């Protein structure tokens, strides 16, 4: 027997749904009655006909071959104009966003399209190209500025923290666009398409009525006007409404599907385009480190770091401790290249002294070697919420086989959590996913900003064991508020602060 409370909820939902349907039916019936009343009051079938006469006119049109040919041709031309404007609007908007000069160059053309009346465009198009593709041209001109403007706005809304993550993990090109920019852009496109789809049909049909291309809905409307067939005119108008609504629902449904899960190119296909250009990380020979010399950083008048001198070594983990606001995160961002120092230098060193033989603040041999290839765990998890844990790693690690990603995730996460969107994971699961992404990335330097935040003691111990196992021979630098974390990691403690 069902739980009484559950049964009560189901019954309540059923009543609400039925009431909603009854209310909708009542509203439709009200307007149909008002329409019929208006037709009776006018008393002229030429000026206004009732819904019954329109329905009969539509029934008479259905068996006719020309009826379906007209719908198909208008649908093809208007849809072509809309789709061309949609795709080119995204391309042009992206170009304007990523290259501001291109945006300045395109601005007058977009403003012209937005301000010039459709009737003027129709007349010009008739002179230039005739009537056959008139609706394609007009639908394009009406839709393009809407998509263009919303594309630039949507791209500008992309989370800057995710873009920093992409910079650190070297996510570029199509993977960056589809994984980071597209989810931010999609709500803007969805909203604009709800308006633009209706506008494309209205303007496209209006262009057909003016140009009267053969075998189109516009031609049928024009003929209905010539022969004073008001019922047929209303029937064709109903067809336009249904065709426009159907196309809108289909297109928005397909557009919505692109925002579900992974949209970037799978790594096996992506590898073909890269050829043999995979990033292969050479193993470092011996011990290496980073020398920080006289490093200073200000934000406005606030001096966050002042003449910091530290040498980090790959001999063992390096733990940074300092009170909140002392510059730990700023120092780590400087090491990742996300901030530039006001003075001082950060250089790779080929070797360092034994960290157990000196104090926490040391000087090191200076070397002008290339920067280290880095990966990071940020203070925030910086995962793509719409992607699963698996796909978050695939986005950042295209060279890693899927089987390896799954096997590594299963070491720290429950199996049933791997394919769920990151937005549905607990804080601890998100943290472990971010840690795995950094550990598995090809790198010589791993930066972790308070990596154990949100982990219970049992999970923390498991994660620490995994980090120690997988970072042997790499330069690991992490910040923490707990000295015990440094001891359990087997690391050496560094303190910073003014």
Image: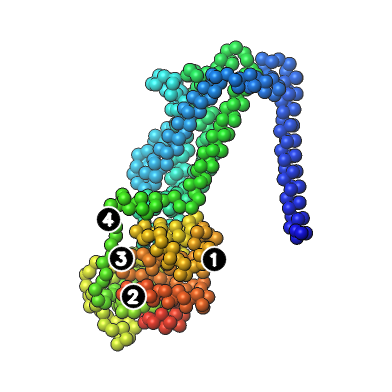
The disc label shown at residue 472, or none: 2
Q: What secondary structure is marked by label 4?
A: loop
Of the numbered discs 1 and 3, the one sitting upstream in the chain is 3
SS for dot 1: loop
Q: Nearer the viewer, residue 6 or 427?
A: 6
Lower position in the chain sequence, tag 2 or tag 1: 1
Task: Check disc 3 and report the residue beneath it.
Answer: 373
Give the residue displayed 53% in from the left and 63% down from the top. 416
Instruction: Name the residue tied to disc 4.
Output: 277
Q: How is the image coloured?
A: rainbow
Residue at mark 3 to residue at mark 2: CA–CA distance: 15 Å
Discs 3, 4 touching: Cβ within 8 Å: no
Q: Is residue 98 visible?
A: yes
Seen at 53% across and 75% down, the residue is 456
Task: Give the image location of residue 126, x and y in percent.
Answer: 43, 20
Q: Earlier in the sequence, mark 3 or mark 2?
A: 3
Q: Read off the residue under disc 1.
A: 426
Query: What residue is at 29 percent from the left and 87 percent from the top?
Result: 357
Label 2 – label 1 distance at C-alpha = 29 Å
Question: Is the C terminus in the top left, top right, bottom left or bottom right quadrant?
Answer: bottom left
Image height of 52 relative to 409, above or below: above
Residue 68, x across and y down, in percent: 54, 23
């Amino acid at each position: 027997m069902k739980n009484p409370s559950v049964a009560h909820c189901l019954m309540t939902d059923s009543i609400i749904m039925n009431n909603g349907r009854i209310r909708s039916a009542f509203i439709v019936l009200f307007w149909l009655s008002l329409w019929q009343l208006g037709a009776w009051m006018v008393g002229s079938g030429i000026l206004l006909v009732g819904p019954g006469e329109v329905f009969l006119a539509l029934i008479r049109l259905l068996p006719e071959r020309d009826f379906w040919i007209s719908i198909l041709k208008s649908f093809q031309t208007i849809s072509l104009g809309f789709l061309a404007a949609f795709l080119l609007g995204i391309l042009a908007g992206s170009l304007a966003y990523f290259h501001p000069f291109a945006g300045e160059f395109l601005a007058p053309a977009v403003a012209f399209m937005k301000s010039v009346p459709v009737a003027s465009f129709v007349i010009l198009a008739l002179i230039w190209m005739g009537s056959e593709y008139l609706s394609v041209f007009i639908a394009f001109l009406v839709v393009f500025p809407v998509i263009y403007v919303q594309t630039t706005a949507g791209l500008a809304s992309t989370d800057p923290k995710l873009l920093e993550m992409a910079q650190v993990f070297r996510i570029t090109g199509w993977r960056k666009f589809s994984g980071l920019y597209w989810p931010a852009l999609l709500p803007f496109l969805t909203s604009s398409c709800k308006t633009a789809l209706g506008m494309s049909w209205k303007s496209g049909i209006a262009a057909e009525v003016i140009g009267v291309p053969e075998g189109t809905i516009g031609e049928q409307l024009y003929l209905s006007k010539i022969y004073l067939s008001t019922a047929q005119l209303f029937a064709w108008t109903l067809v336009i409404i249904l065709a426009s609504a159907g196309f809108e629902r289909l297109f928005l449904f397909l557009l919505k599907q692109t925002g579900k899960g992974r949209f970037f190119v799978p790594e096996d296909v992506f590898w073909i385009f890269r050829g043999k250009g995979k990033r292969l990380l050479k193993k470092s020979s011996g011990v290496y480190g980073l020398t920080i010399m006289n490093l200073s950083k200000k934000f406005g008048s606030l001096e966050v770091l002042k003449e910091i001198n530290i040498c980090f070594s790959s001999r063992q983990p390096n733990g940074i401790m300092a009170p909140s606001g002392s510059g730990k995160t700023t120092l780590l961002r400087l090491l990742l290249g996300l901030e530039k120092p006001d003075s001082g230098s950060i250089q790779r060193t080929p070797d360092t002294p034994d960290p157990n033989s000196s104090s926490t603040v040391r000087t090191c041999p200076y070397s002008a070697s290339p920067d280290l290839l880095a990966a990071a765990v940020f203070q925030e998890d910086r995962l793509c919420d719409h992607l699963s844990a698996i796909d978050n790693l695939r986005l950042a690690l295209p060279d890693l086989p899927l089987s390896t990603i799954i096997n590594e995730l299963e070491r720290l996460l429950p199996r049933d959590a791997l394919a769920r969107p990151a937005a549905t994971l607990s804080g601890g699961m998100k943290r472990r996913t971010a840690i795995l992404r950094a550990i598995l990335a090809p790198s010589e330097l791993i930066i972790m900003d308070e990596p154990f935040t949100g982990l219970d003691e049992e999970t923390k111990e498991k994660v620490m064991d995994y980090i120690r196992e997988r970072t042997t021979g790499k330069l690991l630098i992490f910040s923490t508020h707990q000295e015990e974390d440094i001891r359990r990691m087997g690391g050496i403690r560094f303190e910073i602060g003014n």
